[in-house]
Structure formats: C-alpha cells, structure tokens
Image (tube, rainbow, N blue to C red):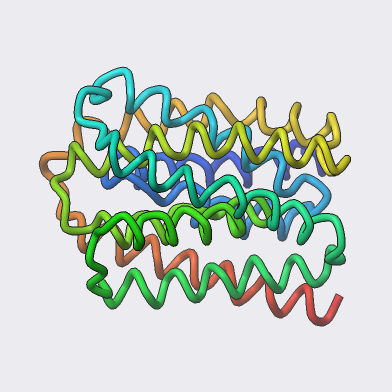
Amino acid sequence: MTHETFVVVCAGLAVFAGAVVQGAIGFGLGLVAAPLITLLDPTLMPGAAQVVNATLPLFTLAAEWRRVDWRGLGFALLGRVPGSLLGGLVVLYVSTRALGVLVGAMVLLAVGLTGRAVAVRRTGGTVTGAGFISGITGTATGIGGPPMALVYQSAKGPQIRATLAMFFMISACQSLAVLAFVDRLPARALSFGALLIPFLVAGFAVSRPLRRFLDGGRVRAAILALAAVSALTLIVTSTLG
C-alpha cells in the first residue's frame, strides 16, 4: 500500500465515522474527521474537510428539508459571514504547526462543552453569535458544528438535522470561497476531498437505519472520546514537529 493510499483510507474511515454520527444526530463530521486529516497531511486542510462538509448535508436535506428553522438559519448566517472572513485571515497568517494546535484545541473545547451539554438559550443573539464562532473555526479548521449544535440541542431531532445541514452546506461553500480568495485552497485538497465522498455516502447510509434505534448519548460519547484522543495526538505532534 502506497503512502497516498494509506492516507486516503485512514481519512476515509474517519469521514465514514463522522458521517454516521452527523447523519444520526446532526453534526460531528468535522469534529471526527478534521483532526485525523490534519494529522495525516496538514496541507490538505481545511479545504479537504470543507469539500465533505458541503456534500453530506445534501443527503440530509433530501429527506428533511421541510424541517429547517429558516428564521434561526438567517440569524446564524448573519454571524457566519464576518466569522468566515476572520477565519480566512487565521488561515492566511497562522503557520501549519500553529494551525494544528488550534484544530486540536478547538476539538478539545468542543468535546468538553458538548459532553457537558451546556444549556444555551436559543435567541437571535445567541444563534448569531454561534454562527460567528462557527465561521471562524469552520473556515480555519474545518470544524464549525459544535457552536451551532449547542444552541440547537433542545430542538427536536429532525429540526436539528435539517437546520444544521442547511447551515453547514451554505457555510462550507462560503468557506471554500474565502479560502480560494486568500489562495489557501490547493487543487490537491479539492481532489482529495472528492476521494472521500464514497466513504461519506457509506457512513450516511449506515446512519439512517440506526437513527431511531441507537442511543445518541452513548454513540456521541464514544465518538467524542475518539475525537479527544485524535485532538491530543494532533496537539502533541504539532508541538513536537
């Protein structure tokens, strides 16, 4: 097995696991996949992650688009636009090593907040703020889900999945545009992201029959533990590298 094939397979398995989680609970793809992809080849990030981030929501929306919270989505996008621009500056001026530490730190923070299920009241202000933070972290690291998931955690499953899917699709396209504008979107990252789409499709297919039967808490806890280990490994590697 060549090194390139090894990277594709490992990243693909991470995308598969992330797609299972996001297909079932509404977010998790970037949280699971981004640390490992960055660890395998930091030059692919965050472009490769944004390719899959833009693709997976299409499958969710095909089934649940009627449950989108359009008002909340508008507030989220209002914050997301300036957040994306700030995230582009982070990518432009932060080194690869520092970006690796940033990705790992953001994942650990997200794991801690999500694991504790911090209660956040869903208002226009909190949703706009979540969109702003998501814009920064999503554009810079490929991980933009946790802030939005926290403000929507009290909503019903279909509304969470549909609203976050629409937000992620628009956000990922926006981030790709910003990355291209600041010349941080190499063609290799796009092609690598495209190679991961079959893994994404398989993960989403697995998530659909499991959605009603699996205990979301236990599945999420296991995946968050995996994400935390990946993030810690990424921080150590980036620091020592």
The residue depicted at 35 percent of the width and 62 percent of the height is 126
Q: Is residue 226 left or right of residue 83?
A: left
Name the residue rendered at 66%, 25% in the picture.
194
Q: How many marks?
A: 0
User: Where's the N terminus, which quadrant?
Assistant: top right
Q: In the rendered image of this protein, does residue 134 appear above or below residue 54?
A: below
Residue 125 occupies quadrant:
bottom left
- Between residue 200 and residue 5, name the one nearer to us: 200
Does the image show residue 2? no
Above-or-below relation of 111 to 176: below
Position of residue 204 measured from the top left corner of the image (x, y, whole percent): 37, 31
Can the viewer see residue 41? yes
Between 206 and 137, the residue placed more toward the observer is 137
Residue sitting nearer the eye, 130 or 156:
130
Residue 116, image x, y percentages: 28, 77
Q: Is residue 5 above or below residue 103?
A: above
Q: Quadrant of residue 206?
A: top left
Q: Where residue 233 appears, x then y in whole percent?
A: 64, 73
Which quadrant is home to the C terminus?
A: bottom right
At 44% from the left and 53% from the top, the residue drawn is 145
> Nearest the camera: 145 or 23?
145
- From the viewer's perspective, tell me whether residue 87 is left or right of residue 67: right
Left or right: 83 with respect to 77? right
Residue at (42% x, 71% y) in the render: 111
Residue 36, given in percent of the width and then of the height, sits at 63, 56
